[in-house]
Image (tube, grey):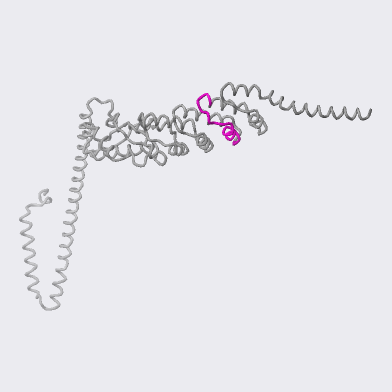
Amino acid sequence: MENYVLALTTQQIILIIIGFIVLIPLLIVARFLKLWIQAISSGARVSFFDLFGMWLRKVSPTLIVSARISAVQAGIEDLNTRDLESVFLVRRSPADVMTCVNALIIAHKANMEISFAELQAHHFAGGDVENLVKAMIAAHRARIALTLDVSRAIDLAGRDILDAVQTTVKPKIIDCPMASDAMNMLDAVAKDGIRLLVRARVTVRSNIAQLVRGATEETIIARVGQGIVSAIGSSPTYKDVLENPDRISKKVLDSGLDAQTAFEIVSIDIADISVASVRDVANVGALLETERADADKQMRQAEAEGRRAMAVAREQEMKALVQENQAKVVLAEAEVPRAMADSFRAGNLGIMDYYRMKNVVADTKMRDSIGRGPTEEQDKK
């Protein structure tokens, strides 16, 4: 009896073990059967062992199978589940997988030879793989020489590679100065002193070769503005600028302002030009001539006033000089008595000589008084 019980127990254990061995595959099949049938019906074969391995590695089998089905339906047969898992396991983000797969599908449909590994590397480097692929397709259709390495470098440098390619095909117009500028006009002065207000439009296309290290739109705007101001400043009169504004644009265009920039300047067009503060005046020339005449008049008046002031100052100088000479005469006459006294002491002058000199002086005074006529006091008497 005991042997029978022991044998029964052994049989039960064996049955239980066999049941577990059979049950586990059944559970696996039951868990992944729907997903496996979906993959088989779509042509994207995935084994149960691969699905079970994904489950053990905590990878979403549904995500990987859906991505593989999308690739196979697009005609990509060589994309296996391990490549897709490697994308997911980096950051465990489903968006990484679908982004790389969608970019690969777009490239494959456009017959672009780009591998899944290259797209994966660029995506995890911080690039925009879908934008990259679209840019390469646009460049290929437009027959623009653009390699994958150059595209990745431009994208990782922070430039919009798709916008750059589109700008190469369809040039972009830049306002100079920028529309956000408060004045919205360039202020320049010709040699004749007339201020001109100018607004220009610059047509540019992307320069793929200089896109990584080249300067941006702000540099183009600054250089064009500087060139326009310089060209107007070298013009003899404002009339030359108003008559031929295309000379200004040609001169600026020939200056090579797009050197070391990410753009190539196609054309520079003067959109608007006017004389400062006379925008609403019909006859600008007459107004400027009137203002010039008034300015000349004021200048001449200032010059005449200056000459008059100098003449008055010269007159005062002459009067002062006369007074100075008269003072010198008085000083010289004051020395005569002293000289006479010295002559008396030295015996060079006698008393008779002195009286004769006094007579001569008296005679001279008399002659002067006769020559002057009656004085005012005599007239009063």
Q: Quadrant of the N terminus?
A: top right
237 up-or-down from 370: above or below? above
Q: Position of residue 297 (x, y in %)?
A: 20, 37
Residue 25 located left or right of residue 91: right
Looking at the image, the residue that sits furthest to the right is: 1
Magenta stretch, main secondary structure, is: helix
Q: Based on the picture, tell me whether residue 85 belongs to the magenta stretch.
A: yes
Residue 122 located left or right of residue 175: right
Residue situated in front as seen by the camera: 44 or 330:
44
324 up-or-down from 293: above or below? below
Residue 168 located left or right of residue 124: left
Which residue: 59% across, 28% down?
A: 64
Which residue: 54% across, 25% down?
A: 70
Q: Based on the picture, tell me whether residue 361 belongs to the magenta stretch.
A: no
Q: Quadrant of residue 198?
A: top left
Which residue: 20% across, 29% down?
A: 286
Residue situated in front as seen by the camera: 22 or 333:
22
Q: Quadrant of residue 165?
A: top left
Residue range of the region highlighted in magenta in the rendering? 72-90
